[in-house]
């Protein structure tokens, strides 16, 4: 059982890289994208204001449409494949999942059920904020904040 919370999000500037990939290639794509964005943040001399995230625009594991990003304090100029964007404001459901990435189906299913039971539906983008990294903690200690923008039916 996961503690799911409803909140109102403010718009959040971010620096992002977008990609189409398979779930098998995803860890490599995420790592490379975060590396590029961190390089640009270092050039700018700024720090992210929240954990890095991956946004999933679909859940087709063989043809994922994803965006890797870092929330920042304001919009910055684009640079090569790094783009400034704004995560839109709005209502969202969220929960914290602790454990390996391979076990994330359960919190997603619980969140979908909770959203339905509360008279809403997902808005079609799923955000995973990675509060720590596999290089820093054992898989069982990984913390991921899952955020689903929602709309009322």
Image: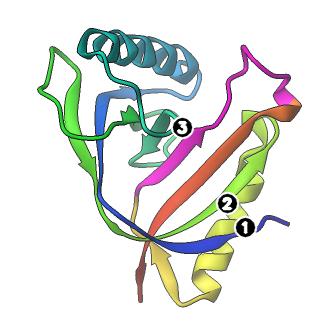
Residue 145 drawn at (x, y percent): 63, 49
- In the rendered image, which residue does mark 2 sit on? 95
Residue 34 drawn at (x, y percent): 44, 19
Residue 71 placement, left or right of 51 = left
Secondary structure state at the residue bearing disc 3: loop
Whether residue 58 is in magenta: the answer is: no
Residue drawn at the location 15% of the way across and 17% of the way down: 79
How far apart are the alpha carbons under marks 3 and 2? 22 Å
How far apart are the alpha carbons under marks 1 and 2? 10 Å
Q: Are marks 1 and 2 in contact (CB under 8 Å)?
A: yes
- In the rendered image, which residue does mark 1 sit on? 110
Q: Residue furthest left?
A: 77
Whether residue 129 is in magenta: the answer is: yes
Give whichever of 10, 105 is nearer the camera: 10
Q: Are marks 3 and 2 in contact (CB under 8 Å)?
A: no
Q: Is residue 35 above or below residue 9?
A: above
Q: Which residues are magenta?
A: 125-139
Which label lies toward us, 1 or 3?
1
Secondary structure state at the residue bearing disc 1: helix
- Which picture quadrant has residue 15? top left
Which label lies toward us, 3 or 2?
2
Residue drawn at the location 71% of the way across and 53% of the way down: 96
Give whichever of 43, 28 is nearer the camera: 43
Q: Is residue 26 above or below residue 115?
A: above
- Which disc number belongs to residue 61? 3
Mark nearer the N terminus (1 vs 2): 2
């Amino acid at each position: 059982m996961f503690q799911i919370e409803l909140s109102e999000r403010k718009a959040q500037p971010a620096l992002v890289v977008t990609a189409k990939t398979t779930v098998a290639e995803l860890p490599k794509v995420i790592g490379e994208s975060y590396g590029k964005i961190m390089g640009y943040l270092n050039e700018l001399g700024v720090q992210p204001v929240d954990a890095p995230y991956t946004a999933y625009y679909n859940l087709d594991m063989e043809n994922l449409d994803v965006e890797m990003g870092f929330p920042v304090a304001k919009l910055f100029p684009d640079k090569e494949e790094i783009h400034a964007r704004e995560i839109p404001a709005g209502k969202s459901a969220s929960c914290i999942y602790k454990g390996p990435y391979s076990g994330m189906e359960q919190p997603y299913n619980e969140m979908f059920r909770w959203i339905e039971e509360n008279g809403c539906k997902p808005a079609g983008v799923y955000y995973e904020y990675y509060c720590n990294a596999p290089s820093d903690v054992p898989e069982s200690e990984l913390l991921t904040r899952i955020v689903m923008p929602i709309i009322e039916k």
